[in-house]
Amino acid sequence: MTRRVLSAIVIVAALVIVGFGVPLGAAVQDLYREEALAELVREAARAGTSVPSTDPSDPIELRHPAHGVDLAVYGPDGRRLTGTGPAHGGDEVTVAATGRIAEHEGDPFVVATPISSAEQVVAVVRAELPASTVANRVHRAWLLMSALAAGLLVVAVIVGRALSTRISKPVAELASASARLGHGDFTVRPASSGIAELDAAADNLALTAERLGRLVERERAFSADVSHQLRTPLTGLRLHLETALANPTADPRPAMDIALGEVDRLEGTIDDLLALAREEPTDRGPVDLREILDVVEHAWHGPLAAQGRPLRVDIAPGPLSVHAARAAVVQVLDVLVGNAAQHGRGVVQIRCSRVGDGVVLDVSDDGPGPGLDADAIFQRRAGSGHGIGLSLARSLVHAEGGRLLLAHAGSPTTFRLVLRDADHVAPTD
């Protein structure tokens, strides 16, 4: 690319030089030809002061003319009286004898100037300059102009090389960054080049990489969340169907009703996780916790009973509603109860109470605790499959403006969910 940019700059510079140089060269030629005639006029006028106006036949002493100029004095009849020139003055002298200045631009350049006395032409001064002298002057000017053009072309090459290097380097970096982005490197951040257009392209590329990175990360998290969150309802669905198949004489409708309930639960989970992964806006309004806890209790009563473990729900008296998305609260409680079912022991208990301007839900079991500190328990552990559900739950809670923490790491292990009380949230227009 550097060579192409440099070639383009040099070609443009050459075209500009030629475009200006050719007309300028022609103008210089015309200027020198006109200057030659003007010089002959001056020399003829100066020589005319040496010619006696009374009797031109008297001896005439011509002053030394400029270099290359030949001077001669002619009588009105065209005969040379003195100086250097043809014996007969020719057409120019004949015209000047009538009282006019005659000029001839050719080879040679000739100017004839009349000398008058008593309103009569008494003599003619003829000045001559060889065309080769004028041509040499023009050629020297053209040579100087050519040298200047060559110098400008060299400067254009130097400047073009510097500019092409400055332009091609950030462009190459942009191309490399684009290739890295195409191979999945979302950390690309092209350096600033100082060129506004290229910096704008680099900023847009960095912004695209950041957005793609977030998108891919959300999709990966969604895949992990889906596999984690759907495992339990799928297992329950399989157990119910296998139980129904094991007893073909029994009425299949209860098993089918249960299976349809599990399918509804799966659909709700998928919709909630898709909304989280795509950062879709969610309708947040007053949510009745009693209704949500009934749903959670209905979903987990059977699986926990199959393990010989009771599920107890303790709700404080009075209405309890929170300002949050219903699906998010259901998913968080589902994660907490599922975590207690998989990793805990004994009774799984949910306590719900109002504290200040918030509502607190504690989910506890009789297990020995996770063996991790309060922050590490909510982090995904790469490759192990652990921490996915709790990380998802914390993300959902933070999105709802609440908090999720490990309130007690020993026995009983207690996770605490804090949400905003709907009665203390100011209404919005």
Image: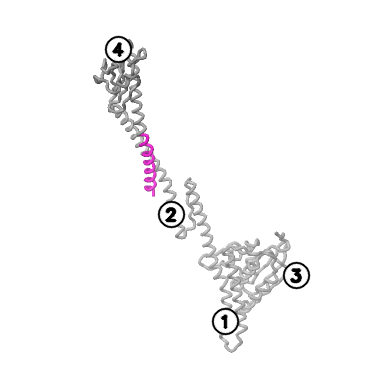
Callout 1: few (<14), some (14-19), or many (20+) C-alpha neighbours within 10 Å? some
Q: Viewer-proximal residue, 313 or 24?
A: 24
Whether the magenta-drawn stretch holds residue 285 is answered as: no
Secondary structure of residue under mark 3: loop
Q: Residue at x 62, y 69 (%)?
A: 331
Question: Mark 1 or mark 3: which is in front?
Answer: 1
State the CA–CA distance, disc 4 to disc 1: 143 Å
Tell me whether circle 2 and circle 3 mark residues in contact (CB < 8 Å). no
Q: Amino acid at mark 1?
A: Leu
State the CA–CA distance, disc 2 to disc 3: 64 Å
Question: Mark 2 or mark 1: which is in front?
Answer: 2
Q: Which mark is residue 241?
A: 1
Q: Amino acid at mark 4?
A: Pro
Whole-percent x and y of residue 17? 37, 38
Tell me where the magenta segment starts and ends, as one range.
Answer: 1-25
User: Which residue is the extreme one toward the left?
Assistant: 87
Question: Mark 4 or mark 1: which is in front?
Answer: 4
Instruction: Specify which label sits upstream in the sequence, 2 or 1.
Output: 2
Q: Viewer-proximal residue, 158 or 16?
A: 16
Tell me whether circle 4 and circle 1 mark residues in contact (CB < 8 Å). no
Whether the magenta-drawn stretch holds residue 4 is answered as: yes
Residue denoted by label 3? 317
Whole-percent x and y of residue 234? 56, 76
Question: Mark 2 or mark 3: which is in front?
Answer: 2
Q: Quadrant of residue 239?
A: bottom right
Secondary structure of residue under mark 2: helix
Residue denoted by label 4? 56
Callout 3: few (<14), some (14-19), or many (20+) C-alpha neighbours within 10 Å? few
Q: Is residue 305 visible?
A: yes
State the CA–CA distance, disc 1 to disc 3: 39 Å
